[in-house]
Amino acid sequence: MASPPNLISCNESSDLESIQEIVVSINDYILSVVSNPEVWFSLKQQCISMLSIEEENTLFEFSSEHSALSNLYWGIESIEASLQPESSEEKMSRLRNSERMLQMPALLDEQGTTTSGVPNSTLVAFSYFYLSIVSCIQGDSLQTTLHFLQSVLVSPDVLRNEIAPELCECLFFTPGVSKSDEEIREIARKYKYRATYYQVISYGKNHQRSSECTEKQLQRPNKYRPDISTANGHSFAEKLELSETCELLQYQNLQGVDMQEDELNDIFNKLKASRPCLDWNLHEDYNPELGKNTRVMSLNDFLNDSQPTKSYNEETLAKRSHSLIGHFNRSIFDIQAQQAYKTRNAHIEDVSSLRKLELEEDSAYGSITFEGMRRNLQTIRLGDGVQTHSRRARRMSLWENLQSFIKEVLGNDDEKYLSEVTMIYQMLNGKQGVKYSMLKDVILDQLLMAISSSEEKNVIKASMTALTKIISVNRTAIEEVKRKGLNLSHLANALKQNVQEAAILIYLIKPSPTEIKRLELLPALVDVVASTSSSSCSYTFRPSPPLLTPPAASLMIIEVLVTAFDHATNTMHLAEISSPNVLGGLLDVAKSGNSGEFISLARVLVKCMEFDGVNRKYIYQHTQVAPFAHLLQSNDREEIFIALQFLHEVLKIPRSSAIKILQQIKKDGSFDIQDTLLQCIKQLQGDHRLFAADILLQLNVLESPPESKKFRNEATRALLEAATYSECSNMQILSTLILSNIGGTYSWKGEPYTAAWLMKRGGLSSMSHMNMIRNINWSDECLQDTGIDGWCCKIARRIIETGKATFCGLQEGLKSKNKNVAKACLIAIALLSIEISKGPNSLKYSACEVLLEEIAQFLHPGLELEVRLLACICIYNFSSGKGIHKLINFSEGVRESLRRLSSVTWMADELHKATYYLFSKSDQRISCVHTQTIEMHQSGSGAVTALIYHKGLLFSGYSDGSVKVWNVDEKLSSTLLWNIKDHKSAVTCFSVCETGESVLSGSADKTIRIWQIVKGKLECVEVIKTKESIRKLEAFGNMIFVITKGHKMKMLDSSRTSQSIFKGKSVKSMVAAQGKVYIGCIDSSIQELILANKREKEIRAPTRSWRIQNKPISSVVVYKDMLYSSSTHVEMSNIKDLRRSYEPQMSISAEKGSNIVAMGVVEDFIYLNRSSSTSTIQIWLRRTQQKVGRLSAGSKITSLLTGNDIVFCGTEAGVIKGWVPL
């Protein structure tokens, strides 16, 4: 292969001759490749080898990846076929087909991606190189140059090492000086700009090779006989007139002469005249075998049809052009704007945007397209002043011409034609005068009219695309569009009809959140975003494109819809976007977008995580966290804020998963994130300071070098200061919430589960007690996380190392009047107490000295069971070992509280035993005083017929069929949360399923309803129909046991099939406990059903008396391995002894003429409601069977419930009352 001639260095002065020399050198090289069979085949084999294509198997699969390889391979084959001896028409057809096929792989995204295992940069580089060969054979030397330079821009390494090493050596290297790929790209970019500029200002010159010269260089022995001249001659003649037009108008612009109305008319008449050619040429290029156009032509191709009648003054133009040599490194649009209007600074943003817009087209078509500018120029003769255009078109007004032109352009979908409108508008925008303002108005009016009145989807889409481009390159146009009254409803309707470009316009117009909501756009926006969903989510920051994409605009509008309104409205909008498809689309939009889109994504993701646990889990599984961490390095505080908020929120997941995220952030290691977070703590205020402290303290646990101590000390100090000294209650709540859960865990919903984990660890196991605690799903997988123990110890150890100040800070939090702050501090102390119990006695004494007295206040009856159990955990850990002597200082009230909790957890039972031995038995006194603390009433619903606790909420059933749910707080004040009337008759009973997830209600309407709290709302999830009214029910596993109105016992299995049990018995009461069901019968017998084998057994025989009908077992209760049964009197038996015989160990005597209607049993008391006194509750001591008092309900008692040392009753008057023993 002949080596190309040496060129000037890129550092020498650039002029037109140097550009010509570059063009000639590149074309000579291309021709030498095509004309030498050995070189051609060598290069072809090299390409096939690098792309891993097997020539024996070129039947590619029908996939997007194999399509790219297939198009490249057959594009090369088509070039080779065009060199065979054949007719000119067949040759040009093959070249057009080759060009079409090569453009497909050339459009691939070369940034860091692969296709079929081949780097896209290699694919695109080879595609542009072979496109340059096509242009060379077609005779377009400048286009050949532009394609070759684009190939260099894509992959300098491939060009200089594989394709054209000699040519690259001459073009880009100075002898003895090495250059990096980026330096080569910069040189190639400058060459390309200069070649493009030269293509415009000297288009009329014969820079194409003659047919004879081309043929001579393409001669090949035997096989190849090129025929290029026919292809070249016609093209050159067609382009001559437009070349003159471009150069002469450049000359006019240099002279500062404004275009007149007649001249503009000539432009648009010429553009209109070209339209018939458009249809003909499109028809000509249609290939029925391929099923689509082989080449889409722009208006410029048809402007070339007119023939020149007179030459132009080349010498004058050349002189003017040489004055611009120093500006070659700018695009032609910057130069044109500077020449047309001296005050271009006013429009610098528009010009720059337009340049970016055209550079985007460059990536799609292989070179910068300047057709738009050329079509806006006119053919005018200089010299003798004679004008060659016919003046017949002047009969039509300039405005009509422009309107007609725009209408015709909007009829075509091609981006090239839509760019015409943008180019014309930009040209007019650079001029002053009423005439040009009116012309701009005509353009905007036509586009707005098409949007509002056209019924053709493609016209609306084209109009919106053109208007979007105009606004993007000229931000002042948006005000004009608003002034003209662009109707948002038209844009909304278009978006709903899947014209996705409408999303961009809506975003650019910036309507208010209220307007966006009123348009009801969210479903359409979701469709736009979901269409971009993919399985991959790796983020790469790239330069902002000149135009927003519809998915990106949709993302930023969605951000407004989920953040700008009240909680209820935001939640409603979040529900619509909460699906894997939409979340995947959101993640896909931002992975190649700019930082603005990335910030919008972060805000939306935070809201999605707050909304739903499914969203949070999906985001954890499909999002890389490191890019969000990198935002902490930003100089923009808003970006730092959203990064901190996102990282804080994404770490609110089960502990093992959170540790993986922390490790991912740590592994990134591209910057010192701990130091960055430390600076955030020092410089920021409010919530974001606490977010930084939270993240820093967790990251610090992953490693423990000596220098890391300063990080954890600062983080802990920041959290304690906010908890102790902050005047803002929200800051106190947030800081203590972080402290209480930083060593624990969260559910996938982002709910703190540290307290639940601590209570299960402390021995809480009874579902009846668990149901007294609010907002906990005790079967949640996060509570089985094995990583919590180790993490808790590490966090606790690091916090304790900060010294006594930590205990003092938490003590202040315990004293807070804000219940949430005090409770959070108690949880934090319980976490620390686990590690304190392992430490030296001095540490325990220090903690007891500061905290024990305050903690003991949380043991008292009437407070939430959760708080009482947490306080018990703290005291147990503080008093372990020699610390037990601290219990001596406990008051009688504290000791009594521990006794009442002894049945709930083993920790409380151990503490109770310790105090029992520390003090004489005579000191163990019981307070029998009960204080009424609760009274709830909802008129119009009838009697309160059933009561139960579920998830810490009080459920009440009424005789009118309604179910009401109350929140009873630690101050024993109540709030009605839900009131649902789904049953048709009275609600007779409740039961909680074994897992605690559902509550069942039985009714006289012959149905059982299953209720669940779903996303903060009570919902009926299942209705079970029965043949009889329901009196009593119990749920155990998948089975439901029912006592009917006719006193029959039924069992419903998982398929809801009913089966009779204890067929010979009339059943009055039952209770399920310890894998068995104990059943009280009307004949005074007690039956036992073992659930494992469905074995029935009688454990108490019926009373043989003629008064048997007066002694039904009205109630059975299991408490502390003891079975309590009541009829006319109360009996207590040990369950273990029931295997041998039924021998009561305790009995409360009967009252004459009175039966027991209802019974409740707690640690110290037995509560009885008798038929002789239906409006009162008798109080009996459980251990001594002494009657110590009574409670008056004011009307007939219709239901009874005990829990957390509180006794509740519902009355016939619809009132619920509650008493606490103090």
Image (cartoon, helix red, strand yellow):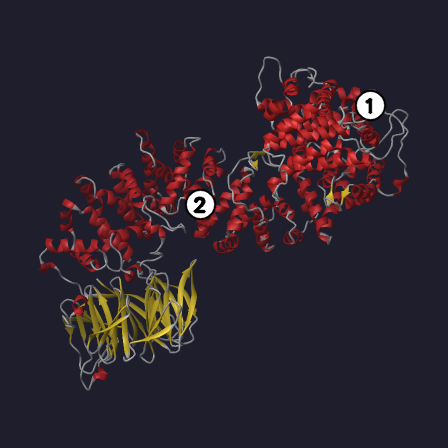
Give the position of the N terminus as an image quadrant.
top right
Q: In this view, does 769 lie to the left or right of 1028?
A: left
Foreground: 602 or 105? Answer: 105
**Residue assigned mark 2:** 620
Callout in the foreground (1, 2): 1
Can you give x and y, in whole percent of width and height, for residue 872 in the image?
23, 52
Can you give x and y, in whole percent of width and height, for residue 781 in the image?
36, 52
Disc marking residue 212: 1
Give the position of the C terminus as an image quadrant.
bottom left
Q: What element carries label 2?
A: helix
Foreground: 693 or 1107? Answer: 1107
Image quadrant of residue 698? top left
Q: Residue at x 43, y 65 (%)?
A: 1021
1074 above or below 649? Answer: below
Image quadrant of residue 743? top left
Foreground: 868 or 227? Answer: 227
Q: Residue at x 20, y 83 (%)?
A: 1153
Q: Can the viewer see residue 1108 in this picture?
A: yes
Can you give x and y, in whole percent of width and height, for residue 1174 in the image?
26, 78
**How much space separates mark 1 and mark 2, taking CA atoms?**
67 Å
Can you give x and y, in whole percent of width and height, for residue 936 in the image?
34, 68
